[in-house]
Image (cartoon, rainbow, N blue to C red):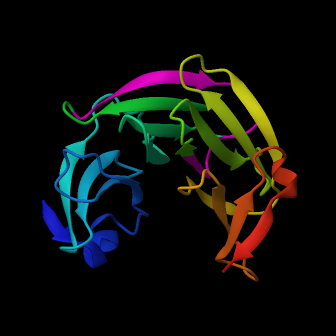
């Protein structure tokens, strides 16, 4: 199924499409994910199209929260947020469109805000709400071992997580008064994170 990007939200029932930069084998420049159905899309932003690649086999019944691609080897990772706490990290094999559980993490965060693979490709940074609050915990998960390193609590209602080409980590603040504020996350202590733009 191929469709225009601007109509994608309606086709997905209003769901937000999580995006990761495409690997070199993809026709488009992004890989998209419908979080509720765990369906992957090849997104070509130049042509304005998104082509369904089908539902990911082996995905958890409640779907994935978001995806991120390793900048070093192109591996596609996905997170399955917990209901209140904890989360699971998966790899997605794009040749077979199937998911494999990498690590189940017992944590105070549900991993619901977002994930980003660090520039070295050795760890996945995870941000998520603490239980039912809008406080956000930032954690680093070693890809090889599953060991978790906490990096503090940002507070606030955040959405998304991404590294830039300098290795700086960012999220976006969401609330009724200040939605769209770009936050640079302090990677030592997330409580020291600062607003850097709108």
Instruction: Identify which residue is drawn at 66% across, 40% down.
Output: 110
Residue 57 falls within the magenta-colored stretch: no
Q: Quadrant of the C terminus?
A: bottom right
Is residue 86 visible in the rendered image? The answer is no
Q: Quadrant of the N terminus?
A: bottom left
From the viewer's perspective, tell me whether residue 192 is left or right of residue 97: right
Q: Residue furthest front?
A: 166
Instruction: Identify which residue is drawn at 27% across, 76% down.
Output: 7
From the viewer's perspective, tell me whether residue 129 is left or right of residue 10: right
Asked where in the image residue 164 lies, by quadrant, the reply is bottom right
Instruction: Identify which residue is drawn at 54% across, 22% down.
Output: 103
Q: Which residues are magenta?
A: 97-115
Q: In this picture, is 129 found above or below 12?
A: above
Is residue 78 visible in the rendered image? The answer is yes
Residue 95 versus residue 189: which sits nearer the camera?
Answer: 189
Q: In this picture, is 79 found above or below 98?
A: below
Pinpoint residue 57: horizontal percent, then vertical percent: 27, 31
Asked where in the image residue 168 lies, by quadrant, the reply is bottom right
Pinpoint residue 195: horizontal percent, then vertical percent: 77, 71
Pinpoint residue 155: horizontal percent, then vertical percent: 83, 57
Q: Residue furthest top?
A: 145
Residue 104 falls within the magenta-colored stretch: yes
């Amino acid at each position: 199924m191929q469709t225009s990007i601007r109509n994608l939200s309606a086709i997905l029932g209003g769901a937000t499409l999580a995006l990761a930069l495409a690997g070199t084998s993809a026709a488009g420049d992004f890989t998209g994910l419908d979080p509720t159905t765990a369906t992957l899309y090849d997104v070509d932003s130049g042509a304005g199209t998104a082509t369904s690649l089908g539902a990911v086999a082996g995905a958890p019944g409640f779907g994935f929260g978001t995806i991120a691609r390793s900048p070093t080897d192109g591996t596609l990772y996905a997170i399955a947020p917990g209901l209140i706490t904890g989360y699971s990290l998966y790899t997605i094999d794009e040749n077979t469109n199937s998911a494999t559980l990498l690590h189940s993490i017992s944590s105070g965060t549900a991993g619901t805000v977002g994930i980003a693979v660090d520039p070295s490709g050795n760890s996945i940074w995870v941000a998520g709400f603490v239980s039912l609050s809008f406080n956000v915990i930032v954690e680093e998960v070693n890809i090889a071992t599953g060991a978790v390193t906490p990096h503090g609590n940002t507070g606030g209602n955040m959405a998304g997580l991404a590294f830039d080409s300098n290795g700086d980590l960012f999220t976006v603040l969401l609330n009724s008064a200040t939605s769209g504020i770009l936050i640079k996350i302090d990677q030592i202590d997330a409580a020291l994170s600062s607003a850097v733009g709108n």
